Image: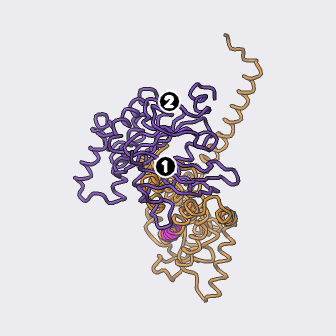
Chain colours: A purple, B orange
Amino acid sequence: MESHIQVKDLKVSYGKQEVLKNVNLEIPRNRITVIMGPSGCGKTTLLMTMNRFLELNEGVTIAGQVLVDGHNIYSPDVDVTEVRKRVGLLAQRPTPLPMSIFDNVSYGMYIHQMRKETIEYKQAVRHYLELAGLWDEVGKRLHDPATALSIGQQQRLCLARGLAVEPEIILGDEPTSALDPVSSAHIEHKLLELKEKYTTVVVTHTLRQAKRLADHVVFMYLGEVVEQGPAAEVFGNPREERTKQYLQGLF
Amino acid sequence: MIKNFWKRKHIVELFVKLVMMFSIALVGGSLLLILATVVARGLPALTWEMVSQTPKGGFYMGKGGGVLNAILGSLYLAGGGTALALALSLPMALVLKTYLGDSKAGSLVRLSLDVLWGIPTIVYGAFGFAVMILLGMRSSLLAGILILSLVELPIMTRAMDEVIRRMPKGLEHAALALGSTKLEVATKVVVPQMLPGIITAILLAFGRGIGDAASVLFTAGYTDRLPSSLMSPTASLPLAVFFQLSTPYPAVRERGYASALILTIVVLVVSFGSRALSAKLSKYTVK
């Protein structure tokens, strides 16, 4: 299987505390990769290196490489805004921008000047809202404030907004943890639908969600990747003792 | 389940409630008293002449004409000062947030602004006067505007800074995650989110500017004529009130209250106008 993202010898520390110790990973193209592990194991930190979000924190040192299509996104000649355009992020809590529903979806296309005519923006907004499964609920009130939507709708709006800049990769940082069960199921369902076209990396701390979503699994513990491989292998026949214990719910 | 009023917690609650009500009554009562005084003593003297003419027969003793010179002067002074302060404050507040953050340089800038905020406006006036003498400048509208913008700058920047700092953190990240530059985050997300708060900051600064007598005393000077150029002296309402109230003639003192009433009305109109605007703009903001 062809890998879309490769992580090579990645080391991250906050001040003197090392949170990622020599991580090496292969993330397959057009599959859902789930990063799982107990709290504080560095899942989110690892995910945030993939859209260069980690460096927004103060006092972080990042060493090693993250390659997207073979190109190191940490090399000095890289335009960080292009990286973030290609690698979309679905955050833990939905964060609508202070504008209308329509403008939320068109914002990214607008700043990257991806369309020319107003009509093209209108069509695109409809397309991505449909893709995120939100059009039927908001099609008649596109100019309402985005904050008027429910939390579950807001998260689908954020998905539509992220898809609208045409990324290749979707990162999900526990994207359903703030949602009710029905909205969570909605988001999971959408991620499964979208994986044909996008490489998806999801961080989760719920094992059941990992099992529902994963094609490929990365198990992390204390800043290290313990085991990675196809979901069937890791869940069905884990090689490492620590993976077995985690899957049995021992920690 | 019957409420026992003599329980300690109910007595404490009642006591705190009474203290709060007393404070509210004190603040509200003072405001009403001030307004009542200004209206009661100013309204009889507030004629159409007062707002449509310049003083006649010498300002300190004159009982004729009006204070149009001071009304226009104050609007020019405070309007110009606020516009200038805004042109400097908004970029400053954005730089503070986006590039300096909570760094050492950032807290040094904030400290300086707080110190500037605390300086009495008469000191600004004296400083401006000293600089004007150095440059051989006469008191003028321009000098008044420059000094008022300095007076307003710290209050406006710090008010904006506080508004920006209270911004939901996820918002910036959401915009960055879509590949925005820092400038795009600032102009397309931070400013629209902050606009209602920014308008409040402008209003605060304008209020301080238009009500201040001490800083314009030396810098803008005073004249019975309408403001005609940036380089000539300009009257202002607070100074009109000050001069009129300090005369020995009761009729002129009544006119002083009328001038104070006009100043109050100007401030109220600006205040309510910007509140309405700010309410309209906060339609899309994230609470």
Q: Which circle marks residue A235 in the picture?
A: 2
Q: Are marks 2 and 1 in contact (CB under 8 Å)?
A: no
Q: Is residue B65 left or right of residue B153?
A: left
Q: Residue at x 60, y 77 (%)?
A: B219
| Cα–Cα gap, marks 2 and 1 | 37 Å
- Residue A143: x and y in percent read 32, 44
Q: Determine whether B166 is above or below A215 in the image.
A: below
Q: Is residue B264 within the magenta segment?
A: no
What range of the chain is rendered magenta? B75-87
In this rendering, the answer to whether A33 lies above or below B81 is: above
Residue lying at 41% horizontally and 33% vertically, measured from the top left? A188
- The number of numbered badges drawn on the structure is 2
Q: Amino acid at mark 1?
A: Leu
Q: Residue furthest right?
A: B8
In this view, the residue in front, B28 or A183, is: A183
Q: Are marks 2 and 1 on the same chain?
A: no
